[in-house]
Image (spheres, grey):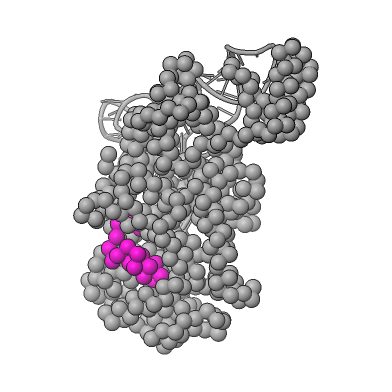
RNA sequence: GGCGGGGUAGCCAAGUGGUAAGGCAGGGCUCUGCAAAAGCCUCAUCCGUCGGUUCGAUUCCGACUCCCGCCUCCA
């Protein structure tokens, strides 16, 4: 089924069918705005990265050969400030958060991007791009030594600034902060491509034809995405707050330099609320993934919860919801576990119904809620068939194969059962013996003892089952 | 002030011009020595408020109201 997406470039024109630029309709280039590594990423950031992972997995599920690029912004105002405060080096400081970021990304079950370019390793490309813009007359060097992008000049050559949203630069509140901007721009809307070195930058600067300095905020994305994916590529995604100015400026820089359309599809993920409120440290609803793991939740539970709502809707992330995620995943685990038991070593081609309904839901602008509904209906039907023993080993294997197919998109897997150690097994056997002898007092005592040791014993029609708490 | 997204059961969340998916929680039942676990069933005369269009609106239009986002670093 044809995948339809909401392209921000089209705004209110509705959904647009996704067709890759590749003449073979096979290869897809996808760029996702990655982290600025100045701290641990929070749950709001993770929503966007899990969303990007969903897009990538959906494309791969649909048979495309995706090249997923995610930048690491490792030079920026906040980073420089903290490097100075902590008396460390840029690389040491950013390296720590970059590693943490990639660990968290993995914990959330996200496929690792194929390329993760760092801004500091692409200074040459950035400078080259700026030189191109200067040569084309849409960028200028100001008295302060910085290089700025001129929106007026850009518009003057027939280019459109304001592709992602309706912009009315005159009506816009050129806020107090902008007015008091210390930079010497010709126009408030202009933005820095190259920031001239200032004493506060310390050791963080690079030589350039414009003088010593460092890249502006947006330019690294243009330089690195063009390098990795070409001057025009398929998909660019990020959080909705990045539409303006970041993405708008990226388009201006890129199209201003190449004269070609930059990106075919722009996808933006909505923000989330935590416990119904905007996240803030003072409200106590500001979570990093680490905070949630420390509360006993798992990465897959967080992933599940982040994947329950449509990407363009504000989502209310709650701790209650996270507890609910645990239960919901437990039902899937239970069902898949039973299927594995029935299937034994049998393998079969996947059932088509589940995957077909699932992909139809996703094809509709990634309607993940509808996709989950398909999954849970399948769980209920499967459970019924398991209950009335109408499932053969072959049926179970086919169902399992179908589940694995949809899980290649969901990425929640199924929890493997923990192996009980010998001591626990011995206790369980003793309990079974006592139970068989109808010594319920003793069997219950052993059950309590097992519980104290962290294991729960379940009686099933097929015998006992040990479960780790 | 400009631009944009929303208000659907206790909570989370899809969706449709013809009478409301799914998940969690709750309730009932099955299984069990009792439990637990699991499974099955059940759970919105109603979709922020008020008007309008329509045979019919939660879905379209208008007004109002509340919440949220961008315009400044931001996922």
**Relative to the observer, which residue lies in front, A10 or A179?**
A10
Residue B71 vertical placement versus A380 (above, below): below
Asked whether residue A85 is in view, the answer is no
Residue B13 vertical placement versus A252 (above, below): above
Q: Position of residue B74 (x, y in %)?
A: 48, 62
Residue appearing at x 55%, y 55% in the figure: A103
Asked whether residue A431 is in view, the answer is yes
Query: Horizontally, is A237 left or right of A40 in the view?
Result: left
Residue appearing at x 56%, y 63% in the figure: A97
**Relative to the observer, which residue lies in front, A322 or A407?**
A407
Q: Quadrant of the C terminus of chain A?
A: top right
Number of marks in the image? 0
Residue appearing at x 73%, y 31% in the figure: A423
Query: Horizontally, is A74 left or right of A284 in the view?
Result: left
Residue appearing at x 33%, y 60% in the figure: A164
Residue A419 vertical placement versus A409 (above, below): above
Q: Position of residue A123 (x, y in %)?
A: 42, 76
Query: Horizontally, is A287 left or right of A135 in the view?
Result: right
Q: Position of residue B6 (x, y in %)?
A: 43, 44
Q: Is residue A233 magenta?
A: yes
**Relative to the observer, which residue lies in front, A230 or A361?**
A230
| Span of residues in magenta | A219-237
Q: Is residue A403 magenta?
A: no
Q: Position of residue A72 (x, y in %)?
A: 47, 64
Q: Quadrant of the N terminus of chain A?
A: top left
């Amino acid at each position: 089924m044809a995948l339809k997406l909401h392209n921000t470039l089209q705004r209110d024109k509705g959904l647009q069918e996704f067709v890759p630029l590749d003449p073979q309709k096979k290869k897809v280039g996808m760029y996702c705005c990655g982290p600025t590594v100045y701290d641990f990423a929070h749950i709001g950031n993770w929503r966007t990265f899990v969303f990007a992972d969903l897009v990538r997995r959906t494309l791969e599920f649909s048979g495309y050969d995706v090249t997923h690029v995610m930048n690491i912004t490792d030079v920026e105002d906040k980073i420089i400030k903290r490097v100075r405060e902590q008396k460390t080096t840029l690389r040491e400081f950013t390296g720590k958060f970059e590693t943490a970021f990639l660990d968290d990304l993995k914990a959330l079950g996200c496929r690792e991007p194929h390329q993760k370019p760092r801004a500091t390793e692409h200074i040459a490309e950035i400078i080259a791009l700026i030189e191109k813009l200067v040569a084309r007359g849409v960028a200028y060097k100001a008295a302060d030594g910085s290089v700025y992008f001129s929106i007026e000049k850009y518009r003057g050559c027939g280019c459109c600034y304001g592709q992602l949203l309706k912009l009315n630069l005159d009506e816009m509140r050129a806020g107090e902060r902008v007015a008091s901007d210390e930079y010497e721009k010709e126009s408030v809307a202009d933005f820095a491509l190259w920031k001239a070195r200032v004493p506060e930058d310390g050791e963080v600067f690079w030589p350039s034809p414009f003088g010593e300095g460092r890249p502006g905020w947006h330019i690294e994305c243009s330089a690195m995405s063009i390098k990795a994916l070409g001057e025009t590529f398929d998909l660019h995604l990020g959080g909705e707050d990045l539409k303006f100015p970041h993405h708008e400026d990226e388009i201006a820089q890129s199209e201003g330099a190449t004269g070609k359309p930059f990106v075919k599809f722009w996808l933006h993920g909505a923000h989330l609320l935590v416990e119904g409120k905007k996240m803030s440290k003072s409200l106590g609803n500001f979570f990093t993934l680490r905070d949630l793991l420390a509360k006993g939740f798992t990465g897959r539970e967080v992933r599940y919860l982040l994947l329950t709502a449509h990407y363009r809707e504000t989502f209310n992330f709650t701790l209650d919801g996270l507890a609910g995620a645990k239960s919901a995943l437990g039902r899937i685990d239970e069902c898949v576990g039973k299927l594995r038991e029935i299937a034994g070593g049998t393998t079969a081609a996947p059932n088509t119904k589940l995957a077909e309904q699932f992909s139809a839901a996703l094809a509709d602008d990634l309607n993940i809620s509808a996709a989950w509904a398909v999954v849970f209906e399948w769980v209920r039907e499967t459970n019924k068939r398991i209950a009335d023993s109408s499932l053969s080993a072959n049926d179970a294997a086919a169902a399992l194969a179908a589940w694995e197919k949809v899980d290649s998109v969901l990425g929640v897997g199924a929890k493997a059962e923990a192996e009980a150690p010998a001591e626990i097994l011995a206790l369980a056997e003793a309990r079974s013996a006592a139970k068989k002898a109808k010594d319920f007092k003793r069997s219950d005592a052993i059950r309590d003892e097992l519980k104290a040791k962290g294991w729960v014993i379940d009686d099933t029609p097929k015998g006992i089952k040990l479960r780790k708490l």
